[in-house]
Image (cartoon, rainbow, N blue to C red):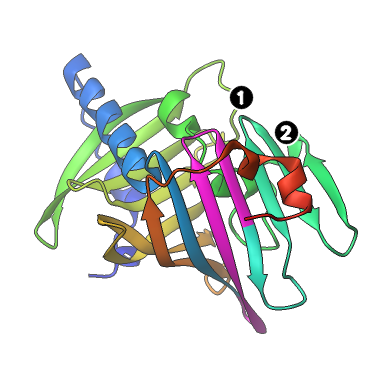
C-alpha cells in the first residue's frame, strides 16, 4: 500500500483521550523509533534526489552519526557539489563549501531553512532528538498495515520549547519503522510531510530506506533520500566530528 494514500490529518481528527499510561506508551514508541533509526552510532552512504517540475538533480553523500549530538554529512557526487559538508555538534551546525573554502556556522534562526536546496531542513538532517525530548506525545489511534500495527501519535511541543512547529503527527510501525511525519504550523495548518516510500533491512535493522519530503501545497516538488548502505554501532573517533575535519577531510 502506498503511504501517500493515507493522509494523517483524517486520522488526527479522531482524538482518543489518553490516560497517563497511554501517554507514557506514546513517549516510549517515539523514543524507540528514533533509537532504531539512529543507533548508538552509524555510517551510511545515501543518494538524494531533488525533484522539481522542470528539472531534477541527484547527489551522493556519506554520513556519520554518534548519538543525538554528533553528525557529519559529506557530498561525494556530482563533481560540482563534491566536498560540500555539514557538521552538527550538540546544537551547533557548520557548513563547508570548497568553492569558498570556509567553514560557516549556521545560526539557530537558519536551522529551519532548506538543506542544500532540498525539501529537508537543516534540522531534519541533524537527526536531533527534539521530537523526543521537547514534545508531549499522545496516541491518537492504531491501525493495521501490511501485517503490522501502526501507531498514530500527535506530538505537541512543550510550552517553553524553542521549536518551529505547532505540532507533528507521526505514524510508527510496531517494529519501530517510521512511516510518516507531518509538520503543522502554529495555526494547525499542514506545511510539509515526510513519507516512507520503501522499507527494507540494512545494517541488521528494519528501516525506512527511502523517504520523501514534500510541501503540502506543491504536489510536484519533493526530495527523496535513499539509503544505499548503512552500518550501525561503529567506533567513531572524536576527531571525526570537528571543524578541522570538515575543512580538511581525514575520514
Residue at image coords 16%, 43%: 142
User: In what element is the residue under mark 1?
Assistant: loop
Residue 60 is inside the magenta segment: yes
Q: Which residue lies furthest to the bottom in this view?
A: 54
Which residue lies under the disc numbered 2? 108
Q: In this view, does 179 lie above or below 223?
A: above
> Pointer 2 and pointer 1: residues touching (CB < 8 Å)?
yes
Q: Which of the 4 image quarters holds residue 230?
A: bottom left
Q: Is the magenta stretch mostly helix, strand or loop?
A: strand
The answer to whether one can see residue 173 in this image is yes
- The residues tagged by marks 2 and 1 sit, at their Cα atoms, a distance apart of 10 Å
Across the whole image, how many numbered discs are drawn on residues? 2
Which residue lies under the disc numbered 1? 162
| Foreground disc of the pair 2, 1 | 2
**How many other residues sit within 10 Å of disc 1, few (<14), some (14-19) or many (≥20)?**
few
What is the magenta range? 51-73
Name the foreground residue: 107 vs 35.
35
Q: Where is residue 100 in the image (x, y as percent from the top left)?
A: 90, 59
Q: Is residue 220 above or below residue 46?
A: below
Q: Which quarter shows the C terminus?
A: bottom right
Residue at image coords 74%, 71%: 81
User: In what element is the residue under mark 2?
Assistant: helix
Q: Position of residue 224 (x, y in %)?
A: 50, 68
- Going from N to C along the chain, the mark reached first, 2 or 1, is 2
95 with respect to 60 (left or right): right
Q: In this view, does 229 lie above or below 31?
A: below
120 with respect to 180 (left or right): right
Amino acid at each position: 500500500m502506498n503511504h501517500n494514500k493515507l493522509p494523517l490529518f483524517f486520522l488526527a481528527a479522531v482524538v482518543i483521550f489518553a490516560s497517563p499510561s497511554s501517554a507514557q506508551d506514546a513517549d516510549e514508541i517515539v523514543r524507540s523509533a528514533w533509537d532504531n533509526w539512529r543507533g548508538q552510532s552509524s555510517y551510511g552512504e545515501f543518494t538524494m534526489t531533488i525533484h522539481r517540475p522542470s528539472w531534477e538533480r541527484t547527489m551522493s553523500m556519506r554520513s556519520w552519526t554518534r548519538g543525538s549530538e554528533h553528525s557529519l554529512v559529506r557530498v561525494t557526487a556530482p563533481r560540482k557539489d563534491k566536498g560540500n559538508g555539514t557538521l552538527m555538534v550538540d546544537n551547533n551546525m557548520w557548513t563547508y563549501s570548497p568553492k569558498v573554502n570556509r567553514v560557516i556556522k549556521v545560526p539557530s534562526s537558519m536551522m529551519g531553512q532548506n538543506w542544500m536546496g532540498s525539501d529537508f531542513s537543516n534540522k531534519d538532517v541533524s537527526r536531533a532528538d527534539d521530537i523526543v525530548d521537547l514534545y508531549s506525545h499522545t496516541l491518537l489511534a492504531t491501525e493495521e498495515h501490511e501485517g503490522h500495527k501502526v501507531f498514530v501519535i500527535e506530538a505537541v511541543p512543550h510550552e517553553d520549547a524553542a521549536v518551529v512547529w505547532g505540532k507533528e503527527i507521526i505514524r510508527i510501525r510496531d517494529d519501530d519503522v517510521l512511516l510518516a511525519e507531518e509538520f503543522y504550523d502554529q495555526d494547525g495548518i499542514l506545511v510539509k510531510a515526510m513519507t516512507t516510500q520503501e522499507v527494507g533491512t540494512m545494517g541488521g535493522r528494519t528501516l525506512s530506506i527511502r523517504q520523501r519530503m514534500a510541501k503540502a501545497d506543491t504536489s510536484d516538488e519533493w526530495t527523496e533520500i535513499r539509503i544505499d548502505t548503512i552500518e550501525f554501532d561503529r567506533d567513531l573517533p572524536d576527531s571525526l566530528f570537528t571543524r578541522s575535519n570538515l575543512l580538511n577531510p581525514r575520514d
